[in-house]
Amino acid sequence: MYSVGDYLVHPGQGVCQVKDVTDGPQAVYQLLPIGKRHPIHISFPVANERRLRPVLSRAEAEQIIEDYPTIEVESFQARNNSLEEEHYRNEMRQGSCRDSVRIVKTFRIRIAELAARNKRPPVAYERILKEARERSSVELAVALDSTPEDVALLLQSRLDEAAEQN
């Protein structure tokens, strides 16, 4: 059971902080999403807490940043953008922070490849990239006691270091 002040990952909202826990037959967590422009409190039944997961530890976050240049890109492609978007959204909801980071890397590369051929990427690609970037950067930022902008700089510097070594 989570306590007031704990950070956890809600499948639909991403990283949230527990603001209150009500007891009783219908025990409920009062959650506040982190990093949202207009956050709203979410009531989440304690009975369904198996759908929640704890935020990464600092060591796990540092390992993801260290491994970023070698994280494999996703190869899944569907018949249409709608099916592809659904697949990746489900993966972000049910997966780990590493999965979201892999999705960010995948769609950055896909969008860059399309831009190199003077093609506009599908709007779905931009939506997937934005959601995956927000979910992963906020979770890494909470784990590292940092900001999402600092996390983006850390990932980029790690990529630059790896490029220099090759």
Image (cartoon, helix red, strand yellow):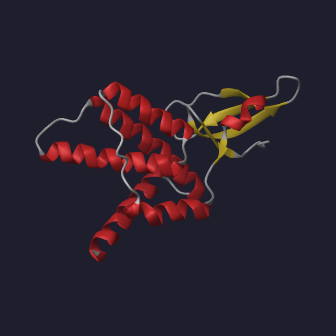
Counting from the top left corner in percent of width and height, residue 98 is at: 50, 52
Side of 159 where 146 appears, left or right:
right
In the image, what residue occupies the spot 22% across and 47% down?
112
Task: Say above or below: 64 vs 162.
Answer: above
In what quadrant of the picture does the C terminus appear?
bottom left
Instruction: Pick out the residue farthest to the top.
Output: 26
Instruction: Pick out the residue farthest to the left.
Output: 118
Q: Nearer the viewer, residue 112 or 39?
A: 112
Counting from the top left corner in percent of width and height, residue 27 is at: 82, 28
In the image, what residue occupies the spot 31% across and 35% down?
125
Instruction: Pick out the residue farthest to the bottom.
Output: 165
In the image, what residue occupies the spot 49% across and 33% down?
90
- To which quarter of the image does residue 46 belong? top right
Counting from the top left corner in percent of width and height, residue 163 is at: 28, 69
Count of marks, rendered view: 0
In what quadrant of the picture does the N terminus appear?
top right
- To which quarter of the image does residue 117 belong? top left
Task: Say above or below: 41 vs 156.
Answer: above
Counting from the top left corner in percent of width and height, residue 164 is at: 28, 74
Residue 29 showing in the rendered view = yes
Task: Say above or below: 80 vs 75.
Answer: above
Task: Say above or below: 23 vs 108.
Answer: above
Q: Nearer the viewer, residue 115 or 149?
A: 115
Residue 137 showing in the rendered view = no
Instruction: Pick out the residue farthest to the right.
Output: 24
